[in-house]
Image (cartoon, rainbow, N blue to C red):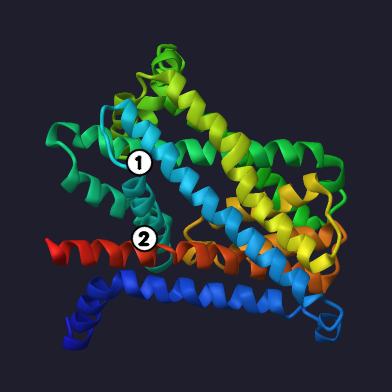
Amino acid sequence: MSRFTEWSRNFYRTYKPYIFMCLRLLLAGILLYWVCRNVRFEELEKLSLRAVIFGFFGGLLCILIQIFLISLRWRMLLRGQGIEISVFRAASLTFQGQMCSLFLPLGAVGGDVLKAAFLTRETDPSKRVEGIATILLDRLIGMMGLFLLVFVCGACLLPDILHFTPVLRNLILPLLLACAAGFLAGVVILYQDLIFRIRIFAKLLEKADHFARGALSRILNSVEVCRKDRTRLFTAFLLSFLLLHPLLIFAGVLVIYGISGEFPDLISSYFSLGMGNVVSTLPATPGGLGTRDKCIESLLSAFGTSDTHAALIPIIYSLGMICAALGGIFFYFRDSFAKKKE
């Protein structure tokens, strides 16, 4: 083995996370450029600056409230396991987790890792497994709410989706099926003790767990710890499905209103923005930047929005999400200052 080859392998092993982060940033930049190409600058003069500012800050407020409510949902799950943290601390960790999801190579999971690290240090050692499991469960319940909301909207718009261009239709229909599958997978995880009593499902689980090298069984066991209070879990799911994700998507509706000057059709808007949020969960780009924007732009255009408006809406929407996530900086510096005082 030559010295150069050995050096290359060591370099790759050491900087692998950062190399992938750079590649993800590059992909995000390419997708954003692809979206911005559709902006016709002569149409920007027709926009009302006051309306655009209203849409941005109205959307930003909705996103900030949504993140705060996510922290309350997580705190509710923690309390179900006998773990008490203050509302402020739950909000602090949630906002810092949102911020880390933008910058850490792990993406959205990086925020969960941060929350788990802090929770492990600040809770009773006997409750650590339950505490970490609530983070997983909170993520699972949130995804189930998003998947179901997007699938319901997509089902209502199925005749329109079938008239999309072949390329867009062949991308959206599998994503709709993936939303249904993701929701059902969440149900399976939450109600595993009932489902896996059936022999055929138990065999399928055994094979899937063998294929995943035991990861699936570890996930199911950790969730089992938190499933004793099913009323609390159902309440958390309803909170996600009926309030949290609709509020996050409504932030985008306000952006649409600010740019177009007209209140949009809610079902098509919720589907376009919601599907963009679904795509953003894929760890292809940091915080879903670029993937979310291109998906929303394509769907809004398919539903009849002008090219310029369809390009501006996801960019301003994503900008609002980034600004809201950067609110974690306040909590980070506050925690650092409090530690120095101690």
Residue 312 at x, y percent in the picture? 72, 72
Does residue 53 show up? yes
Name the quarter where the N terminus is drawn. bottom left
Q: Which residue lies under the disc numbered 1? A: 135
SS under mark 2 = loop
Mark 1 Cα shell of 10 Å, populated few (<14), some (14-19), many (≥20): many
The kind of residue tagged 2 is: Leu
Q: Quadrant of the C terminus?
A: bottom left
Identify which residue, 10 or 289, lies in the foreground. Answer: 289
Please state which amino acid type lies under the numbered disc 1: Ile
In-image side of 141 versus 320 (left or right): left
Give the mark toward the camera: 2 or 1.
1
Image spot of residue 51 (x, y percent): 77, 69
The residue indicated by pointer 2 is 106
* x, y percent for residue 260: 83, 66
Q: How far apart are labels 2 and 1 at the CA level?
A: 16 Å
Query: Is residue 191 visible in the rendered structure shown here?
Result: no
